[in-house]
Amino acid sequence: MEHKPWELQAIWPLEILDLVALWHTYRIPIILTTFTALMILRAYLHLRTPREKLSESPLPSSPSLVAEKSKDTFGTNTVLVKAPRRIVGGTKKRTPSHEDVKPGQQKIQVLVFFSSLTGTTEKTAKAFMVQMTENLTASSTFAEPQLHDLSYIDYDDYFITPPKADPETSYFYLLLLPTYNIDTVLDNFVEHLQETHNDFRIDTAPLSTLLGYSVFGFGDREGWPTEEEGFCSQARDVDKWMAKLTGRKRAFPLGMGNTKTDAAERLEEWKGGVEEVLKHIAETGELGEGVVGSGDADESDAEDADEDDGEVLFDDQKVVERKTKKKSDGLNDLEDIGGSLGKSSSSRIVDPAELEVDFTTYSKKSKLVAAKVTKEMVPKDSPTFNALTKQGYSIVGSHSGVKICRWTKSALRGRGSCYKYSFYGIASHQCMETTPSLSCSNKCVFCWRHGTNPVGTTWRWVVDPPDMIFNGVKAGHYKKIKMMRGVPGVRAERFAEAMRIRHCALSLVGEPVFYPHINEFTAMLHKEHISSFLVCNAQHPDQLAALKPVTQLYVSIDASNRESLRKIDRPLHRDFWERFQRCLEILREKRFEQRTVFRLTLVKGFNIEDEAEGYADLVEKGLPCFVEVKGVTYCGTSSSAGAGLTMQNVPFYEEVCAFVEALNAALGRRGLGYGIAAEHAHSCCILIASNRFNVEGKWHTRIDYEKFFECLESGDNFTPEDYMGPETPEWATWGKGGLIPEMRECLGKGRIRSH
Ligand SMILES: Cc1cc2nc3c(=O)[nH]c(=O)nc-3n(C[C@H](O)[C@H](O)[C@H](O)COP(=O)(O)O)c2cc1C
Ligand code: SF4
């Protein structure tokens, strides 16, 4: 109902009527002003309350705070009520990591988690705990390890964030897990890890504050013989997700054991490795080389590279890469960079008596030059040093190098070894690839060393002592192996085996016999029962003649005639063909002292076409024990392109097979006793062997390494037959492909280079 003004006048006093009139006149500006003032006040109050304040409110710290105990409505049963989990949004750029751990001040708490359905893992875990406790608590840095059954803990307490009970304590996780291909609690666990990683509300690596972790799996090879068929598959899954959740803090490679055979032995090995890492953490506060452990969540997806066979870039390489980014790549041949060497701080004047001079070219001129001043072959401040380290070489002293090859990495990850495993029984993860001379006297068009190695016809450099090189290359090799520790897929068992070098391939960049003390160097290898495969370029007959027996002596045979050799090897020696011929004669003489091999690298358009007969002539001349024929691998560098090499020059495996058959037929026509013994299709490599290594119709291309050392140590003369190994495995023989059966599925991805 509406009131008329005179009616109101009768009811209310005048002042009130004035106010009402005022309100009617000004109500709109009054409402607007009040509203604006309220908005300003609200905004002010909001800004004054810091956002962080919310997250500063006590976070449920596990395990005590995540779960609260409360009585149920009847006041009798105690139930666990989860406190609401507060999620701090966004992906953390960087989380505190082991860098924050100060040795000596922090306590390290090892938590051992296990799962067990039929009790085997539980029993093993308990025994494991007893030993761990005994070993760790001897040091005051370690708190007594704790054992947790995954069936009884709340995953949120340990696998979203590590426990935070005591700021002085840092955690290290060990997980002992069986595998079941049926629905079990383990499926929930794996799912939990996966979900935590993929939960967009939380950091993708929420466990990155852990010091590290490692997983050991128990499985049964009788039912699940290979990993592809599911051997230890759940342990592998957990290892993978833990790597993501911790920002790749895999402290030691995944261990795996067959419950029915070797589990105890494998576990012992793994425990040893883990304890060593823990000791390292206690001393340094860090996980050590090779483990990213940055806690950078952005990087954790790089774990997907698991399936990638690609080269692993080591930290030191990265550093060099960064440092050399702006420098040109081109400048590399030492002969070409004499100027830059001259400027180097690394040259030193030496007493001519101390000097090993010109053992290759005995010219007066070079003796004179060498006597004046000696420089380091690869000084630390040279572009060559940078280029080589960028490619992954560790330079030892001033002229030696070591690198781990792709096959070594493959074998460490439980995958295949190179063709030398198929042919000669060399496990790649126990093989060290090195050279005591980075310099070479050829510039082969197919050399995958990217043209970075120094070249020269004479030794004009400082000579490092052999023991220094020997210790240096071993240390360099082990360092590189250790850097593989945190790489996805590396197997604890292989890792442990790799810490004992058994073979040495002296065939990296450069020419090993160029080094004046090569015999002392190989003697050091043999003394430690490390076999020696030495490849030389057939340009240094005097050094070849003086070389003492090695396990297997190679000569590269890159062409069958002078013109072809000149084009493909681009030798620096003018008398290269004569040198080459002399080397063949020397090899012939050595064929009853050690295993001799012709190494043929086939390059289409250079040395295949119509050359089978020519090669057969060379075999007739050198009568090697073996002829290894290998298709060239294209490395796609500017140096190979500059030499006119393209993918068209890489022969198909069928072409290599056809060539080998032609060569074998040509040898037969000459009445030479050879046959095609073995193949490794994956490396495009085929082995022709002398009938000396065929016993009762079976090829025996493998080597009895221990017998070789026995023969050497006896001091008596011996022949290659004396250390002939067992029969070549069926799968490696000609026509069978050469891939160890379990590896066929893993290695179906094209060719992998091996030298
Ligand atoms: C039903 C069943 C399924 C299994 N599935 C696998 C499997 O997929 N892969 C594997 O490596 N081992 C498998 N195993 C073997 C177990 O992982 C192995 O025996 C383990 O030591 C059992 O540990 P636990 O006694 O602690 O439960 C299986 C065993 C059973 C009984
Ligand atoms: S490729 Fe060479 S260095 Fe690598 S494992 Fe085989 S032999 Fe050893």
Image: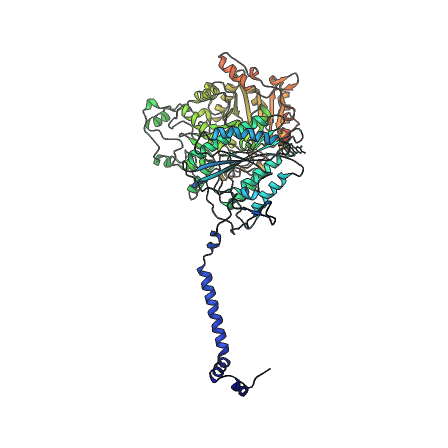
484 with respect to 117 (left or right):
left
Residue 553, how many percent across, how many down? 52, 22
In the image, residue 734 sits, relative to residue 93, either above or below, namely above
Taking the image as shown, residue 191 lies to the left or right of residue 45, namely right
Q: Is residue 448 above or below residue 202?
A: above
Q: Nearer the viewer, residue 727 or 87?
A: 87
* Residue in front for this viewpoint, 174 or 668: 174
Residue 116 in view:
yes
Residue 564 in sight from this viewpoint: no
Count of labels in the image: 0
Residue 687, given in percent of the width and then of the height, sits at 60, 25
**Image quadrant for the N terminus?**
bottom right
Task: Specify the farthest residue to the top.
Answer: 716
Which residue is nearer to you in this view: 695 or 496? Answer: 496
Spot occupied by residue 707 in the image (x, y as percentages of width and height):
54, 16
Q: Pinpoint residue 203: horizontal percent, then vertical percent.
A: 52, 47
Point 60% across, 17% down: residue: 692
Q: Is residue 644 above or below residue 559?
A: below
Residue furthest out toward the front: 75
The figure's colour scheme reads: rainbow
Q: Quadrant of residue 688?
A: top right
Which quadrant of the render holds ligand 1?
top right
Place residue 694 in its image quadrant: top right
